Image (cartoon, grey):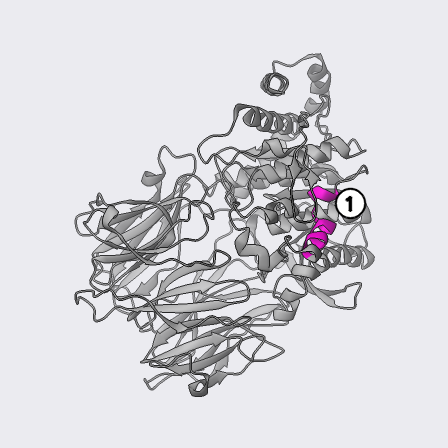
Amino acid sequence: MKSVTSAFARSAADRIAGHSSAAAAQNGAARQAGSNAFDLAVAPPVAKRVDHAVESPHGARNDEYYWLRDDDPRAKRAEVMDYLRAEHAYTDLVMAPQARLRELLVREMRARIKEDDSSAPQYDNGYWYWRRYDAGAEYPVYVRQRGAAAARDENAAIETLLDGVALSRDHAFFSIGAVAVSPDNEWLAWTQDITGRRMSTLHIKNLRTGETQTDEIAGVLEYAVWANDNRTLYYLKQDPVLLQSGPVYRHTRGTSTAADTLVYDESDKTLFTGLERSASRRWILIRIEGFDVTEVRAIELGAEGAVHQPMPPRVILPRLSGVRNYADHLHGCWILRSNDGARNFKLVQAPESAPADRAQWRELVPGRSEATLEGFSLFDNVIALQERVDANARVRLLPWGQRSGAATECVVLADEPAFAMELGYNPDPAAHAVRYSYSSMVTPSSVFDVDLVTGQRTLRKEQVVIGYDRSRYASERAWALARDGKKIPVSLAYRRDLFRRDGSAPLALIGYGAYGVCYDPYLSSNRLSLIDRGFVFAIAHVRGGAELGQDWYDDGRLMHKRNTFHDFIDVTDFLVRERYAARERVFASGGSAGGLLTAAIANEAGAKYRGIALHVPFVDVVTTMLDDSIPLTKNEWTQWGDPRGRDAYHYLLSYSPYDNIAARDYPPMLVTTGLWDSQVQYFEPAKFVARLRAKKTDHNPLLFHINLDAGHGGKSGRFEQLEEAALEFAFFLTLAGVAE
């Protein structure tokens, strides 16, 4: 195996470099002539087969590619790396005729980006904060300027907090996570990841001197919350196995990290732990959360500047099966978003002394069947709500609090049929305006402030898309009928002068459908490279998301998961039947749980698609959910099912993409992964590709692209990410016959 794959990788590299074999020379003329064909002159790598029994309480399954798994977080076995590099080289070889197209796509996507750009400044505790990108920079600079809640002090100096460009030097991957300034505004804590595996290190910086402290903490998650004494810092230590959760610790600035104190460690490893500070800045909230249960614990912080007297966190909202409560604190009371007796959540006010006493809850917003309450932000005289109606999220302002002069209750309106509206980061209740963002599939992302007294809306920033003319594009919201009678929302975008609803257009259809996550329609300037070539771009808001409330979510998980796949297929048929798309030019794409979706539809209805892209796909469902040493497995038994139970085992087995690969024709497929992915381990897509190569009966391209320096999100730089988009787009455009 090792010698075969190593030889292949060397051969492929030579071919791509121009030192080609005779077969490559024959293909060269076609490439120079602008051929849209893939280079399939050389056979793909063939992974060896080694029988391995995957045990379960319900019998064993043979996994002949299990050997591709290597859990070492630092390096993988040579034979594994040889195979992955061979696959990577094969993809480069097959896509070599598209090299110029990919370069063109990267150039045009980059040309739409305003390189010297910045975010809209946001007020918090005496300062306005924003991020600035310099021309050519992959990473931002974090800055601030002193001011009042009403406006920045234009005479004050602009201070640099973090220079992402400098910090990222010498790192193939770089990402800043948590950024937290102390209450006295003199200390900065931040986390950064240089592996792509969400294995971060916490650093502390003196903002007066610019000096980074020596007490850095490795192996943390992206949380950091200061106590009011400006010396005590709460953080989450990363569980070395589960990776996505872990215990809460307390650190005293300037002391050895070995002396850090364990504050709380959740014993139920199916739950996640989170950390945040209340709006009143009086409490640190420890949020323990699963898909069907929550618990909230709180640590009182005391007055600002006072010596911190750490107390054990007390339970303010105990866990109850099926109940999810989310809490914040202001004006001496608790505000709760709860599904207790309200399937789509309600908002209540509870006394500070007894937040769990339902008899003392005062309902502010009732539960509704037609609307889902998704979140809220507290201000001195207003509660800003994010709610969802007919698959669209919207913002509503609710007068509340102790100060007079609040605006009357209002809903922030939109005039498009399908859009994305979201409450922004609103950290300071003394702010004069609520921040929210707005976009649609044809409207650039915009940041607005709504004045909390007058209700006046002010545009603070619209994302610049260079060369983009909004009037040339249109978006729609359609409703497809599922096979069981449910109506599935579909968001579409196209260019007015190129699209005719006559069944001739190529279609790119994406979906997700998991975790109750809503796949909102927003403008991606990258997607314009498809739309400007005549593609219709569509989002299928399939079950498993929560676009239509909790029922929509529950009807696409656990023993109803197959609805997610059927919805996507039914949307495909609807768009072809309604002549939005040509039957032979439909393309599907999805990532992570969306990669499970696209892999499942490849097995169930592959003939309906001209090409499919699977990004970091969750494809080996049964084996992964049987192995609680894999990150996220325990956390997600309530999402997919626990296969230790017979019914769940057989249901998971009925759709697990890896287990349902068969000797049949499959469409052309592009599969991507990151070697250091902690959420979907690289070996899942690697095994999927190996088994698919061995079993499929067609000669369509099957490409496997492995990013050897990244994790779940791919490359970290804003321009580096364009290369990955260009790979998928070139794949689709070539198959659609519009690559030139």
Q: Quadrant of residue 137?
A: top left
Q: Which residue is depicted at the point 76% across and 42% down?
A: 610
Vertical order, 346 against 435 (above or below): below
Amino acid tagged 1? Gly
Whether the magenta-drawn stretch holds residue 658 is answered as yes
Vertical order, 443 against 663 (above or below): below
In the rendered image, residue 453, in percent from the top left (x then y), is placed at 38, 80
In the displayed structure image, the side of residue 152 where residue 90 appears, left or right: right
In the displayed structure image, the side of residue 299 where residue 567 appears, left or right: right
Tell me the magenta residue range: 648-660
In the rendered image, residue 124, in percent from the top left (x then y), is placed at 30, 65
In the rendered image, residue 78, in percent from the top left (x then y), is placed at 53, 23
In the rendered image, residue 348, in percent from the top left (x then y), is placed at 45, 81
Q: Nearer the viewer, residue 529 or 223?
A: 223
Whether the magenta-drawn stretch holds residue 321 is answered as no
Q: Nearer the viewer, residue 303 or 633?
A: 633
Q: Residues within 10 Å of mark 1 (few under 14, many from 20)?
A: many
Q: Which residue is mark 1?
A: 606
Q: Nearer the viewer, residue 167 or 346?
A: 346
